[in-house]
Amino acid sequence: MCEGGNAAEVYASVPRNAGGAAVDPIALQPVDEVRITTLVDNVFDGLLAGDDRVTRADFGNGRVTAAQFEGGSTDAGLRAEHGFAALVAVRRGATTTTLLFDTGLSPDGMVVNAERMGVDLSEVQGVVLSHGHFDHAGGLAGLAARRGRRAMPMVLHPVAWTRRRLVPPRGEVFDLPTLSRRALEGEGFEVIERREPSLLVDGCVLITGEVDRTTEFERGMPSPHQAWTGSGWEHDPLVQDDQALVVHVRGRGLVVLTGCGHAGAINIVRHARRLTGVDRLCALLGGLHLSGPAFEPVIPPTIAALTELAPAMVVPAHCTGWSAQHALAAALPDAWLPGSSGSTYRIAA
């Protein structure tokens, strides 16, 4: 799947053995409800219909000035961009806590969508970054500008600061924008680095930390994706900072939210089940990174494994790709829901 490379690169991409129960299992407290609102996705469809599982934003969200229309305004709907951001509201009893999971690509895309939807980002109590790629962290600037310099905890993996680039075989080198810890701390973010799993919200939200690579088919990024080691550029297949958010809904099972799913959707779900001891997967939402020629061979085994898990809800987003979207919709017609900026998915006990 990855052209070129050497023995060390191949070894680095081989799944690690992680059999048996977790050495340090996570006592993830069950919750009564979780609501996940997609603030930024690659798609906005103002004609999607909702049901008892999802509510949709429509073209009525976002009245903007436009002189060419009678009355001087029009309905703009929401923005779509190559990025991902989700608002996660977790309710346990009468207490609801809201976290932001990723922030989209552009500095203003997420905050504009939030405003148009009537979402108050000042109520966000913490930020989680799934990984350091710029299409998941770009909206931090807009968030900081709206919030001012008030303190805001932000959980990420220490490798999220890594310099990275793309070196296509027949194209120009693209240096990915790199996060600046100094800048983020200057804007009021309290950076919390964790390689290990983290429990947030009084033990109700799990951030997976580094994900064990146990499948034979999820091998990570192809050779053009490179990272700076301090002395040179090397193939970065693992995107080691990739982590997911997990909630256990009482009586329903695990809800797993990914940013890009660089660790592999099935690796992530297995890791969450192993850490928590909860076998049932209720829902999988977020980017699954199955787009493009390098990942098309991963689609069939991913769908086969996911079908065995029989989730009640699957919402592939962002970098999943159209081929995988169509295959997932065909294989899991009762569980699959199309993603779109402005959608709110509700899973309750």
Image: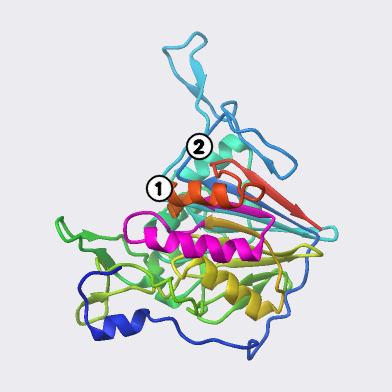
Quadrant assignment for the N terminus? bottom left
Is any part of residue 126 visible from this angle?
no
Q: Position of residue 189 (x, y in %)?
A: 51, 65
Q: Position of residue 247 (x, y in %)?
A: 69, 66
Left or right: where 292 falls relative to 191: left
Instruction: Give the x, y percent position of residue 57.
Output: 61, 35
Give, as a three-letter code, the residue at label 2.
Phe
Q: Earlier in the sequence, mark 1 or mark 2?
A: 2
Q: Which residue is mark 1?
A: 82
Give the magenta part as a residue range.
287-316
Secondary structure found at label 2: loop
Image quadrant for the C terminus? Answer: bottom right
Residue under the point 58% across and 76% down? 271
Please name the residue that numbered disc 2 is placed on: 44
Q: Is residue 256 left or right of residue 237?
A: right
Mark 1: which secondary structure?
loop
